[in-house]
Amino acid sequence: MLQFAQSACNLLCRCLGITFVVWFTILFVIITVPAVLEVSLGIHRFYIRTLCRVFEWATLQIELSAKQKNRQFSKPHTKGILSKSKPLSVQENMQELRSSAHSRRSEPQFDMGDVIYFCRKGVESIIDDEVTKSFSAQELESWNLLTRSIRRFPHRGLRLTLLWGLGVLIRYGILLPLRVILAVTGIFLFVILSTSVGFLPNSKFFLGEKVHLMGYRFCVKSLTAFITYHNSENRPKNGSICVANHTTPLDVIILANDRCYSLVGQVHRGLLGLIQRAMVKSSPHIWFERAEVKDRHLVAKRLCDHAADKTKQPILIFPEGTCVNNTSVMMFKKGSFEIGCTIFPVAIKYDFRFGDAYWNSSKFGLVHHLLRIMSSWALVCSVWYLPPMNREEGEDAVQFAKRVKAALAAQAGLADLTW
């Protein structure tokens, strides 16, 4: 019996050892080498194309199921909070409201029940205004087989339900654990390598840039992100400021996957603080203490000094100051436009068919948000590099910020809001 237990233990150890070797071999061949050499094996592209075909088939199945039940399959006509049917005119709404009460009488010129219609429209306008809509999840026109969007598409057949169950097993049983392991491995390697580069006397920023790129690309792989960059000739250059619309904290990884930036932010503690200290040892980032952030002139001076050095990486700033749901662009704060250096606008547009990238910080914590992203199908987005812009003669910082915001919104097809 003891000999059998020892044999079983040895067999288990061998299996674990083989699994460990196979895992690191796959990690090195499929993840590490492409991340360092900046090459693609085409796996992500095939995966995204397959998902698109599955979503198209799912939409067709929902439409067929609705027809079999003699119900009309209607897509949402709003991207707001309230679920609305096809928009009607005021006269059509009035006729529909009066039809039940006055079906057998001639239609009156005025009815006390008309007040209900106007009250309802007023409350809807308050709840579903253009600003509030920018801070809620974007509506989908077709089901992407995710659990959190299942209630919007009630007409599902047996085959589609079984496919959804299979998708749950794939996302939570295979993709999520694999992505978490990749993320932890990437962060661990990044902290070790970045800290080690910081001890080198010369050329540490050159090596630090390579380490940063490898770390960001590890994170991109862990998110199964598929990014398309447009107009790379307008990529931000050293001694400038890069501004972009803000949807999620992962915007930093999306942009830094293509080139390194100097980040601006407050000093944190814990794991995030450890990563910040490792980053600043091998790259010129700007971290502020909380007391310094309150001093606007001190912050502006440090940004000016950094931007004036043509050997340093461009500063990445999100002038909105908060995350918006990627349907609009909110008002830009003027601080980053007062420095007087060249501004490189960058527009980011996410494809919500594969997962909701918007971070509603009032509803979800950062860890919860990251787990939602990692449990989605993928993170698909397009990035447009716009031509560099400078302040014109007689133009103040506010006008310059509005002009940059308008160009960014037009490129990404987002609503340009003045709020």
Image (tube, helix red, strand yellow):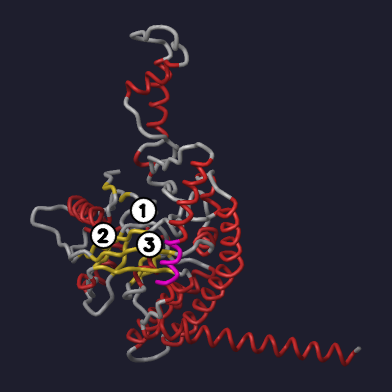
Place residue 9 in its image quadrant.
Answer: bottom right
Instruction: Tell me the quadrant of the picture where the N terminus can be found.
Output: bottom right
Q: Nearer the viewer, residue 16 or 136?
A: 16
User: Could you tell me the amino acid type at mark 2?
Assistant: Ser
Mark 1: secondary structure: loop
Instruction: Tell me the quadrant of the picture where the C terminus can be found.
Output: top left
**At 40% across and 36% down in the image, what residue appears?**
128
x, y percentage for residue 29? 48, 86
- Report the magenta residues as a range: 45-53
- Identify residue for label 1: 326
Circle 3 Cα neighbour tier, 10 Å, few/some/many (<14 / 14–19 / ≥20)? few
- The first of marks 1 and 2 along the sequence is 1
* Distance between mark 3 and mark 2 Cα atoms: 16 Å
User: Could you tell me the amino acid type at mark 3?
Assistant: Glu
How many circles with numbers are drawn on the protein? 3
Place residue 18 in its image quadrant.
Answer: bottom right
Mark 3: secondary structure: helix
The relative height of residue 104 versus residue 208 in the rendered view (above or below) is above
